[in-house]
C-alpha cells in the first residue's frame, strides 16, 4: 500500500505536495502554484523521500498551475543537493511547467518526462 503525506502550501492552501511510495520509488505529486509559499514544502518532502533511500525520486508537476523561480530552484536543489545521491526525474508537459524549464535551460540538466508512467517505466 502506498504511503501518502500531504502538506498544504499555506496562504489559502494554494497548493500541496504529496509523497507516495510506489514499489521503492518516491513519487512527489505537486498541485497548485509551485511558488515561494509551496517551495519549502517541496524541499522538505524531497529530503524526507531521500532519507527513505528509494531507488529513484520522481517529482510530478502535472498538477502545477504556476511554476515560479522558487519552484525551479527547488528542482535544481533536489538534483544537485543532499538528495542528489538518488536519481531524480521530473514530469512536466505543456506551457505551464515545461516552457519555464526550457527557457531557463533546465531541460538540459534535469531528466524531464512527459508523463508519470514514462518516468516510472524508464
Image (cartoon, rainbow, N blue to C red):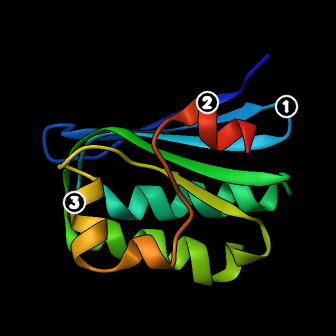
Residue 50 picture location, percent across and down: 74, 61
Count residues near mark 3 (Cα–Cα under 10 Å), then give few for <14, some for 14-19, many for 20+: some
Q: Residue at x 18, y 39 (%)?
A: 14
Count residues near mark 2 (Cα–Cα under 10 Å), then give few for <14, some for 14-19, many for 20+: few
Q: Residue at x 18, y 49 (%)?
A: 95
Determine which of the numbered discs, if any, sits on residue 99 in the image: 3
Circle nearer the N terminus (2, 1): 1
Q: Quadrant of the N terminus?
A: top right
**In the image, which is nearer the foreground, mark 2 or mark 1?**
2
- Marks 2 and 3, how far apart at CA: 21 Å
Determine which of the numbered discs, if any, sits on residue 112 in the image: none
Residue 43 vs 62, above or below: the answer is: below
Q: Are dots 2 and 3 in contact, CB under 8 Å?
A: no
- Residue 56 in sight here: yes
Which residue is denoted by mark 1 in the rendering? Answer: 23
Q: Quadrant of the C terminus?
A: top right
- Marks 3 and 1, how far apart at CA: 31 Å
Amino acid at each position: 500500500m502506498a504511503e501518502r503525506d500531504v502538506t498544504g502550501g499555506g496562504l489559502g492552501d494554494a497548493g500541496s505536495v504529496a509523497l507516495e511510495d510506489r514499489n521503492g520509488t518516491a513519487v512527489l505529486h505537486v498541485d497548485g502554484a509551485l511558488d515561494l509559499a509551496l517551495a519549502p514544502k517541496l524541499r522538505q518532502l524531497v529530503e524526507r523521500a531521500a532519507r527513505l533511500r528509494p531507488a529513484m525520486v520522481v517529482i510530478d508537476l502535472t498538477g502545477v498551475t504556476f511554476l515560479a523561480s522558487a519552484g525551479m530552484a527547488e528542482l535544481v536543489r533536489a538534483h544537485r543537493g543532499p538528495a542528489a545521491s538518488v536519481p531524480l526525474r521530473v514530469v512536466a508537459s505543456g506551457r505551464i511547467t515545461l516552457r519555464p524549464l526550457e527557457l531557463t535551460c533546465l531541460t538540459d540538466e534535469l531528466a524531464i518526462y512527459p508523463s508519470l508512467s514514462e518516468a516510472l517505466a524508464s
